[in-house]
Image (cartoon, grey):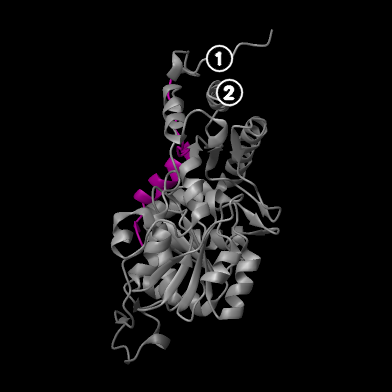
Amino acid sequence: MGKPIEKPAAAGGTPARESKIYYGHQYIDEADVQAVVDVLRHHDLTCGPKIKELEDKLCRLTGAKYAVVCSNGTAALHMSCLAAGVGEGDEVITTPITFAASANCALYCGARPVFADIDPETYNIDPKKVAEAVTARTKAVVAVDYTGQSAALDPIREICKARGLTLIEDGAHVIGTKYKGRYNGSVSDMTTFSFHPVKTVTGGEGGAVLTNDEALYRKLLLYRAHGITRDASLMEHEPDGPWYYEQVDLGFNYRMTDIQAALIISQLDKLPMFSRRRKEIVSRYDEAFGKLPQLSVQKEIPESDTTRHLYILRIVPEKLTIDRRQFFDALAAENVCCNVHYIPTYYFPYYEKLGYHRGLCPNAEKLYEEIISLPLYYAMTDEDVESVIEAVTKIAVYYAKE
C-alpha cells in the first residue's frame, strides 16, 4: 500500500508548525544598530556625509556612474519621470503586476499610465506588448523587475532607443541581481531602488535612482531638494553672499536622512550573504514544488542571475479541488502566513474612475487569480523552509483532482 495522504490542518490534520512564519521580515544585526547609533551621536542627522557615502557605495556595487538617494522608492520613481521629461498629456508604459507606485508616478506628472501585459511564464512585462503599446504620446517605459528577476532589458531598450523613449527600470525588488553579468542599476537609463523593510536590504524606508547620464543626474539632484541649488553655474542671479541659493525648478522634499543612509550602508555589507541565502531557499522551493503537477513555478530567463525578493507560488486550478483563496486559507491554518503580489493596478477604484477596466491584460489577470507569495527572507531557518514545503505539499496533494 502507498503512503496515506496527510490531512492538512484545514481538513482536521496537524499544522506543519506550531508558531507562525510570515512572508517577509527584515534582518538587523548589531553592526546595523551601531551604525545608526553613531549617526545619532553625530552632528549631522540629515544632508550629512552618510548620503554621499551611500551614493558612492551604490555606484561601486552596481557599476552605475551616478546615484541619488531619496526618501523612498515611490519618490525615486517620481523623480525619474520628472527627469525624463514626463508631463501633461504624455503616456508611460508599465506592467499591471506591480505595486501601484509604478503607475502612479506617471499620474503625478500629469501623464497617463498605459498597461502592457506580462509574459505568462516569467511574469515580467512582455517586450512585444510594450512595442504594441507605444504611441506618439509615449514618453517612457517603466519596466518592473518583478520578484527580483530582471526584466528583459535588452529588447525593451531597443524599443526605447528606436522610439526615442526613456527606459526607467523599477528595481524595487532587484538589488543584488545581475542582467547578462552586469548588476541591475547600471543597464537602464535610470534604475530605482527601494529600501522598505520587506526588501532584501532595508533602511526602514528609503530609495535611490541610479544612472549613467550626467544630465539626468543633475536633474535628479534638483527634484530631490525643492529644485534648490547652490551651484553658481545653474543660477540666474549673481550670489550676494555665501548663504545664497536659488530655486531654479519645482522640486520636492524627497531627501533621505543620514540615519537611514547609515543603516543601508551597513545592510549593503551583508548583501552577498542575503543573496546567497535567498537563492538557497528559492532553489529548495523550486525543487520541491516543481515535482507537483498542481503547482507551477516562475520561469527564470537565462540572462538574469536573480536575487529573489518574492517567491511566487502559482496554483494550477484545473488540477485542484480548491481555489487560490482556499489554498491561501489552508496555508494560514498551517501557520504559514502568506501574501499576494500583486492585485493588477487598474483593478483599483481610483483607476476605474480614470476609465481603466478589467480585460486589458489577460495574462496578468489570470496570474493574479492563481498566485500566492510564500515566505522568503534571509533569517528563515532550514526548518522554516521545510515547514513551508510540508504545508504546501500536503495541501496540493490532499486537494488534488483525481
Q: Which mark is residue 6?
A: 1
Local SS, label 2: helix
Q: Is residue 311 above or below residue 85?
A: above
Residue 149 shows in this picture:
yes
Does 36 lie within the magenta span?
Answer: yes
Q: Tell me if residue 44 comes above or below residue 328 in the rendering.
A: below
Which of the image's four quarters has the N terminus?
Answer: top right
Q: Is residue 164 above or below residue 108?
A: below
In the shown orientation, is residue 29 left or right of residue 178?
left
Query: In which quadrant of the rendered view does residue 258 lie?
Result: bottom left
Q: Is residue 189 shown to the viewer in this render?
A: no
Question: Label 2 near label 1: C-beta < 8 Å?
Answer: yes
Residue 218 in the image: x percent, y percent? 46, 77
Residue found 43% across the figure and 38% down from its top: 339
> Residue 121, position in %: x, y?
61, 49
Range of the magenta residues?
19-46
The residue where tag 2 is placed is 397
Instruction: Decide which of tag 1 and tag 2 comes sooner along the chain.
Output: 1
The amino acid pointed to by label 2 is: Val
**Position of 167 relative to 145 (above/below):** below
Picture coordinates of residue 96, whole percent (x, y): 45, 57
| Disc 1 packing (10 Å; few <14; some 14–19; many ≥20) | some
Secondary structure under badge 1? Answer: loop
